[in-house]
Image (cartoon, rainbow, N blue to C red):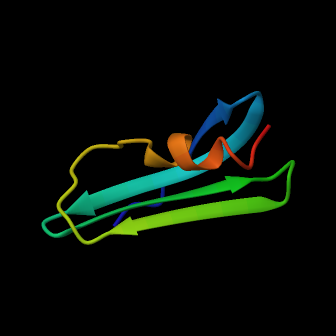
Amino acid sequence: MALSWFCDHLNGTKYCAHAGGGGGYYCEIRIYPEKGLGSVVMFNRTGMTNEKYLDKLDQYFIS
């Protein structure tokens, strides 16, 4: 639906991300180019805003 990627930092490491959702689903994807890592989370529940759920999960892998 959208081609936009947003960039930010987690624990000083740059990432590019896209989040989306609607009636019955929510997902986030992130790419950490400097680390050669990526992460994704998918929920089968309604989500309409960028919840940055991966901030909570990725902090264990990105130091």
Please state which of residues 37 and 2 is positioned toward the viewer in this rendering: 37
Name the residue furthest front: 60
Residue at the image position 72 percent from the left and 29 percent from the top: 11
Residue 13 screen position, x and y as percent: 77, 35
In the rendered image, the vertical position of residue 47 relative to residue 52, given as above or below: below
Rendered view: 42 above or below 20: below
Residue 23 percent across, percent down from the top left:
13, 66
The quadrant of the image that shows the N terminus is bottom left
Q: Quadrant of the C terminus?
A: top right
In the image, residue 61 above or below residue 3: above
The residue under the point 66% across, 33% down is: 10
- The image shows residue 5 at horizontal and vertical percentages of 54, 50
Relative horizontal placement of residue 53, taking residue 16 as reference (left or right): left
Residue 25: quarter of image: bottom left
Q: Residue at x 27, y 44 (%)?
A: 49
* Most foreground residue, 60 or 15: 60
Instruction: Write the residue at 86% across / 48% down.
Output: 34
Q: Is residue 5 visible?
A: no
Decide if residue 7 is in sight here: yes
Most extreme residue toward the left is 23
Is residue 8 rendered to the left or right of residue 34? Answer: left
Number of numbered discs = 0
User: In the visual, does 53 lie left or right of 58?
Assistant: left
